[in-house]
Image (cartoon, grey):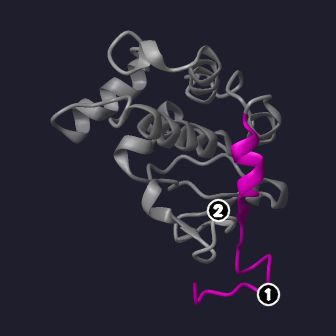
Amino acid sequence: MCHKHGVMHRDLKPENFLFANKKETAVLKAIDFGLSVFFTPVSEIVGSPYYMAPEVLKRNYGQEVDVWSAGVILYILLCGVPPFWAETEQGVAQAIIRSVIDFKRDPWPRVSDNAKDLVRGMLNPDPRRRLTAQQVLIIPGCRILRRLQMSIWVRQLRPDFNSSL
C-alpha cells in the first residue's frame, strides 16, 4: 500500500479504483494520484466532498484520511447511499464534521455487527482513534479485503508501473 511508502492518496472514491484485468481474481488498483503527497502534515482542502475526512475540512491531516475515504466507500457499498448527505457542499461538510452515523435505517438492521464495527472504526472522527489501513486488513472477517490484495502503485515509487490498464 502507498502508506508503507509514505504516500497518501487524498482522493479515494469508487471512480479511482480499477481491476487489473477481467478475471474474478483480479487485483484491485487505486488510480489517479494527482492529489497524492508524501506524508507531512497537510492543510489544503482537496478531494471529493462526500469522501473527505473531518480533519481535511479542519485543514490539519495526515494519512488517516485515506482510511476515512475507504470507510465512506464501504458504507456506500453496504447500504447504497453516502453516510453524510446534504443538498449543498457546505451542508455535506457540516454533516462530515458532525460525523453522526445512522445505523437504524434500512438496510443497517440486517447488516452484521462486525461490518458495522468496521465502518465505525474507519469513520471514527478522531484520526488518532481511527483504524489504520493495516488494522483494517487484519480484521477477522475481512478476508475479501485480503483476497483482493489491494495494491497501490505510484509512478515515483514503482518504475515498472503500467498505466495501460
Residue at label 1? 159
Q: Helix or strand or loop: what does disc 2 sit on?
A: strand
Whether residue 145 appears in magenta in the rendering, the answer is: yes
Residue linked to disc 2: 37
On screen, residue 98 above or below 78: above
Q: Is residue 148 magenta?
A: yes
Main SS, magenta region, reads: loop
Q: Position of residue 102 (x, y in %)?
A: 39, 14
The region drawn magenta spans 142-165
Q: If you read the primary sequence from the N terminus, does the residue marked by circle 2 or circle 1 appear first?
A: 2
Depth-wise, is mark 2 or mark 1 nearer the camera? Answer: 1
Q: Is residue 96 left or right of residue 7?
A: left
Check disc 2 and give the amino acid type: Val
For badge 1, the amino acid type reads: Pro
Q: Which residue is situated farthest in the left direction here?
A: 87
Question: Residue at (64%, 25%) from the top-left corner?
Answer: 118
Residue drawn at point x = 46 percent, y = 33 percent: 78
Q: Quadrant of the C terminus?
A: bottom right
Q: Residues within 10 Å of mark 1 (few under 14, many from 20)?
A: few
Compare residues 111 and 11 and report the one nearer the observer.
111
